[in-house]
Image (spheres, rainbow, N blue to C red):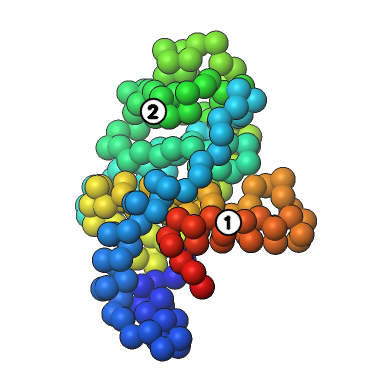
Amino acid sequence: PLSLRMVEEMLLEHGIVVSHETIRRWGRKFGTAYARQLCRKRPSRKDIWHLDEVVISIGDRKHWLWRAVDQDGYVLDEIVQARRDTQAARRLLVRLLKKQGLTPKRIVTDKLRSYGAARREVMPAVEHRSHKGLNNRAENSHVPLRKRERMMQGFRSVGGLQRFISIFSALRNLFVPPHQKNSALAIHIHRIRAMAQWKAVTGATA
């Protein structure tokens, strides 16, 4: 969760003089293209989708960020919506099915009834477990964004937030090791591979 000014100072330590505003423009110009090129996890019918929503204030209005992660903590999709109802939950599920191309083994949500109603419409054969204690994986996935939100002093538009999370989550999916890789060696190997992929996507040579 570095601020742009922190990145500016880090680059200055390496002899690179650039303003934080230029860094922001770099992220906006290249971030989406880089995110699209990053390899995505292959879907499986054994996947378990954890769904959750979190409120994000933009200006004086509340919006809801709906997010889905799998059993490894990999972000599958997320969408900013103005509502927290069945229609919004349905839209998330439809997007997920289209993007993944497969139905999951089960979905896990909190007690919000909108999930159950949307699931019965979109994927009635999929098992649904609704329990707040089972959904920590999805709830924990909001923490990095909350840190980033505080560092950025909030988001200024819905479009800006949607664009940011699409890039932010793609990079986290690449660099953060799955939950089952908890040994020091496994994490080290994961990071080496992630950095190699990042260099291939960005054209970095050093």
The disc label shown at residue 155, or none: none
The disc label shown at residue 194, or none: 1
> In the rendered image, which quarter is residue 70 located in?
top right
From the viewer's perspective, is residue 137 above or below residue 122? below
Q: How many labels does the image show?
A: 2
Residue 38: where, in percent of width, then height?
47, 48
Sort mark 2 into few (<14), some (14-19) or many (20+) by Cα contacts within 10 Å.
some
Q: Tell me the residue at 35%/56% (across/down).
A: 31
Q: Which of 138 and 38 is in front in this view?
A: 38
For the residues bearing labels 1 and 2, Cβ distance under 8 angstroms: no
Q: Nearer the viewer, residue 205 or 129?
A: 205
From the viewer's perspective, is residue 56 above or below residue 187? above
Is residue 172 found left or right of 156 in the rendered image?
right
**Residue at disc 1, secondary structure:** helix
Residue 117: where, in percent of width, then height?
43, 17
Q: Tell me the residue at 59%/17% (across/down).
A: 127
The disc label shown at residue 95, or none: 2
Residue 146: where, in percent of width, then height?
44, 56
Residue 153 visible here: no
N-term-proximal mark, 1 vs 2? 2
Is residue 109 found left or right of 83 in the rendered image?
right
**Residue at disc 2, secondary structure:** helix
> In the rendered image, which quarter is residue 106 located in?
top right
Foreground disc of the pair 1, 2? 1
From the viewer's perspective, is residue 71 above or below residue 173? above
Residue 167: where, in percent of width, then height?
39, 52
Identify which amino acid the numbered label 2 is placed on: Arg
> In the rendered image, which quarter is residue 79 located in?
top left
Q: Tell me the residue at 66%/55% (across/down).
A: 190
Identify which amino acid the numbered label 1 is placed on: Ala
